[in-house]
Image: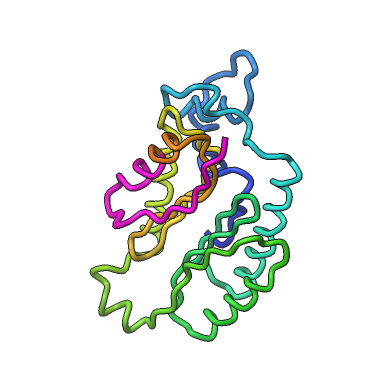
Amino acid sequence: MGDRLRGAAGWWRVLALAIALAAPAAEPAPARAQLKDILVAPKTLIDRAIEARSAADIARDNEIVLKVNAIMAELGTIKASTEIYEQRLLVTGLFDDKATYDDFERKVRAVEGVKTLYWHVAYMSAARQKREAHRVMDWTDVLAMEAKAEARLIGTRGVADVNFRIAADALGAVYLLGRARSKEEHAKAVARAGEGDGVRKVIDYVEVRP
């Protein structure tokens, strides 16, 4: 996931599928709502309203993510994932090379503009990963778990999925970052994030704010 731009909106992951499934266009609708309505229902337009942030705030997130992704590209790693919301940066991943891990952490912590860093990147030697293969997921399975968790939020009435970010790690944790409009929405999002196969726990970094 290191070579993908993440941050402005979690729905880009489903864009290609949406286009493939789309029938000939009817009356124009907000793009965010239109694409997701192709994929899942029922879902209110209010839940799919434009992200509850300013364009400037989203631009700041994008700038940070571009810098972190550039670090990943420089180090040649794809076994890391970034999510961001309101300059609160979440990074997950698993490295089997200690020098690369240390370099990655040092460079990410030096990125300017990050208000809060949630660092969930781990080092584990290749030998140990092999010994503990029963509990360490392959990174492709981690990405699949993320995608399924995102899909669950997209399909949940009463959850404004555009205001949430999902990540996962190789030990089966799902991370939820973002903003909920109410305690009820927060509880629903956390519950849905944890319902998938292979999810061992949900780590919650959601702020509740109307």
Closer-to-camera residue (2/197): 197
Furthest residue in direction left, as rendered: 134
Instruction: Tell me where residue 121 appears, x and y as whole percent.
Output: 48, 70
Q: Residue at x 52, y 42 (%)?
A: 208
Q: In the picture, which quadrant includes the C terminus?
A: top right
Query: How is colour applied across the structure in the image?
Result: rainbow
In percent of the image, x 32 and y 77: which residue is there? 129
x, y percentage for residue 169? 40, 62
At 31% across and 69% down in the image, what residue appears?
136
- Magenta segment includes 115: no
Return the residue nearer the eye: 5 or 161.
161
Residue 56, by quadrant, is top right
102 in relation to 46, above or below = below
| Part of the protein shown in magenta | 189-210
Q: Is residue 206 magenta?
A: yes
Q: Pick whichever, 176 or 94, lies toward us.
A: 176
* Residue at 62%, 78% in the rendered image: 106
Q: Where residue 33 appears, x then y in whole percent?
A: 56, 26
